[in-house]
Image (cartoon, helix red, strand yellow):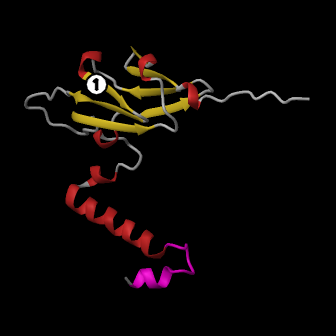
Amino acid sequence: MTRFWLDFPWEGQRGLKGELERMQRTLDYLSKGPEANLGDVPSAGVFPLTNVSQDKDSFFVYAELPGMEPKDINISITGRTLTLSGERSIVQEEGASYHRQERKGGKFNRTITLKTDVDVAEVGANFVNGVLIITLPKAEEAKPRQIPIAV
């Protein structure tokens, strides 16, 4: 805590939040070992990694699902909420001693909230090279309309 009082607010603007985050990282390291501090390395907690984009007519979701089969992936949409779920299996070699183990298996459930309603009847999905591509056409009332100006 002495470091907190010496640093705040004059050096680095760390403050209480920054100090608590540092303490949490230290506790994680002590309880889980070095793999607790992987930084930006994704884990099953943020699986699958996704990108969401849009144009004037549709939303596009790209989800990385390497090693999975389409039959193991569930896609559902309710209102503006898209849900991806399933289970990823990672084969564990019996008797193997791992030097590094970053690939995680298990059940996943990823929820994405869209900005506007979509036309549920027109939603489509493709699975190409381990990437799930979902096209979600916007509902007609959500699409921009050109309004003519009377002269």
In this rendered view, identify the residue nearer to me: 116 or 55. Answer: 116
Q: Position of residue 116 (x, y in %)?
A: 52, 35
| Residue range corresponding to the magenta coloring | 2-14
Q: Position of residue 126 (x, y in %)?
A: 41, 15
Tell me the quarter of the picture where residue 45 sits: top left
Q: Position of residue 120 (x, y in %)?
A: 42, 23
Image height of 42 relative to 91, above or below: below
**For residue 24: magenta?**
no
Q: Is residue 63 left or right of residue 29?
A: right
- Name the residue located 37 percent from the left edge and 82 percent from the top edge: 1
Q: Is residue 104 visible?
A: no
Amino acid found under the numbered disc labelled 1: Asn
- Name the residue located 34 percent from the left edge and 25 percent from the top edge: 65
**For residue 3: magenta?**
yes
Tell me the quarter of the picture where residue 32 sits: bottom left
Q: Position of residue 133 (x, y in %)?
A: 44, 21
- Name the residue located 44 percent from the left edge and 22 percent from the top edge: 134
* Circle 1 residue: 74
- Name the residue located 33 percent from the left edge and 23 percent from the top edge: 66
Q: Is residue 47 left or right of residue 33?
A: right
